[in-house]
Image: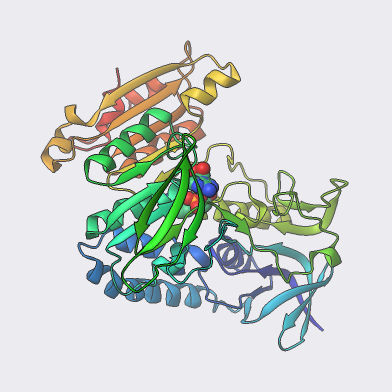
Amino acid sequence: MNCSDLIIIGAGPGGYKAAVYAAKKGLKVTIFEDVNVGGTCLNVGCIPTKTYVHSKTFEEAVERQPQVVEALRSGVETLLSHPNITLVREKAKFIDACTIEASPSGEVWRGANIIIATGSSAKMLPIPGADGQNVGSSTELLGLKELPKRLCIIGAGVIGMEFASVFQKFGSEVTVVEYLKECLPMMDSDIAKRLRKLLEKRGITFYMGAGVKSLTPAPSPGRGETILFEQKGKEVSVKADYVLMATGRKANTEGLNLEAAGITLAPNGTIPVDEHFRTLNGQSSMVNGQCFAIGDVNGRQMLAHAAEMQGIHVVNQILGIEDKIRFDVMPAAIFTEPEAACVGPTEDQLKEQGVPFECHKSFYRANGKALAMNETEGMVKLCCEPEEGKLLSAHVFGAHAADIVQEVTAFITLGATLRQLRETVHIHPTLSEVLIEVN
Ligand code: NAI
């Protein structure tokens, strides 16, 4: 029997970062990965998508993608070659709460602590035709070698909007069909609407409030797939050469034999955890010893950086190190062109929660750097407490929105006020000055 201080299942951003951090702190770590190290984010998610965003043509994107992914993957492999880490390239399965069997070798590993970091995969709609040849998730779309002339995207969430933006740029005729009235439900509604309107102006067609019912394969090559949906009580159909299904993701738990570890899944298929990401028995809310679940598989915040920080927090728990990671201050960004990003609650959420707040705005068109960059489309919204001015949230739409939100994230994490942000010297000319230019 092999013994470790820590067993990690899954070498995505959550798993591999936790492994490296734990190994540096002196723990003996065994990490299981049966596909590629780096997980969805590095291999078929954030990194390939950003390579597409930063390529001028589809051909350039297709050529650059494997080079960028390979370079990063070999970097992760180097990190995992730490003497305290054993990388097992096999599938892991629980035998009991602290024992794992590797498949196909059948070798058994025992761990004082176990972290489940198996991520998520695309949730395909259970509708007729969803298994068609020209229908796929973002993973399959990123594997296409030929640009689809007509691309239909089902779902105007983060994935749908990012791919709509990038494939329109490459020259595809893009149609988006979304069930809700507005795109990006987690974003500030004003910003979501501005982004959609901008993409509409560029030629993307949006069908909002439209639920897709079926997909019918092309009767002959080149005739296109038929996407049938219902909008305002009427049946509407569009044709496309490829259909991207971007209707959410589901936790990867298949084959883990979680029952053996005493874990019952939540009704949405995720692994229930407490505030320190310890797994719970779904029914009794009892903590399952030293077993943890981090990242997409616990469904808390489906973001690579959330998974990474959860992993660090878990290792700190194991080592008895206190940290002050603010999981309630979780920035997120959508890498459309231009970007949209946010941290903290939206105006609507603050209203719903009855939290008193003030909203301060500024616009990119008044920012010198934005004008010089010809990136005048954009706005900033900062919400803060009315009297003290303590910052509550930031919502940004425009070039480099993610970087601008990152600055506010630091202020919110430290409990700072709008006045403190305004009194912080900002380099001129930079886009970040939009923050101190708020009304
Ligand atoms: P999502 O949950 O963000 O959006 C799915 C959309 O599909 C929703 O707006 C929903 O109303 C719509 N939908 C569902 N059924 C439909 C139907 N029958 N007809 C029409 N529309 C329908 O899911 P998405 O975009 O697939 O992303 C999955 C996860 O990955 C999210 O949690 C997201 O945060 C994460 N992600 C984050 C990225 C980032 O941070 N930049 C990039 C990519 C993914």
From this view, report whether residue 107 is shown above or below residue 182: below
Q: Which picture quadrant has residue 8?
A: bottom right
Res 60 seen here: yes
Q: Is residue 10 left or right of residue 216?
A: right
- Residue 31 in percent (x, y) is at 64, 73
Is the N terminus in the top left, top right, bottom left or bottom right quadrant?
bottom right
- Residue 51 in percent (x, y) is at 32, 63
Which residue is at a point 40% across and 50% down the rendered structure image? 237
Q: Residue furthest left?
A: 372
Which residue is at a point 24% across and 63% down the rendered structure image? 55
- Residue 305 in percent (x, y) is at 51, 52
User: How many numbered markers are drawn?
Assistant: 0
Is the C terminus in the top left, top right, bottom left or bottom right quadrant?
top left
From this view, report whether residue 170 is shown above or below residue 95: above
Q: Residue furthest top?
A: 387
- Residue 28 in percent (x, y) is at 69, 73
Res 159 seen here: no
Front position in the image: 130 or 301: 130
Q: Is residue 258 left or right of residue 215?
A: right
Front position in the image: 366 or 1: 366
Front position in the image: 352 or 26: 352
Front position in the image: 25 or 408: 408
Which residue is at a point 69% across and 53% down the rendered structure image? 270
Q: Residue furthest bottom?
A: 105
From this view, report whether residue 59 is shown above or below residue 295: below
Q: Which picture quadrant has residue 250?
A: bottom right
Which residue is at a point 73% across and 71% down the rendered structure image? 255
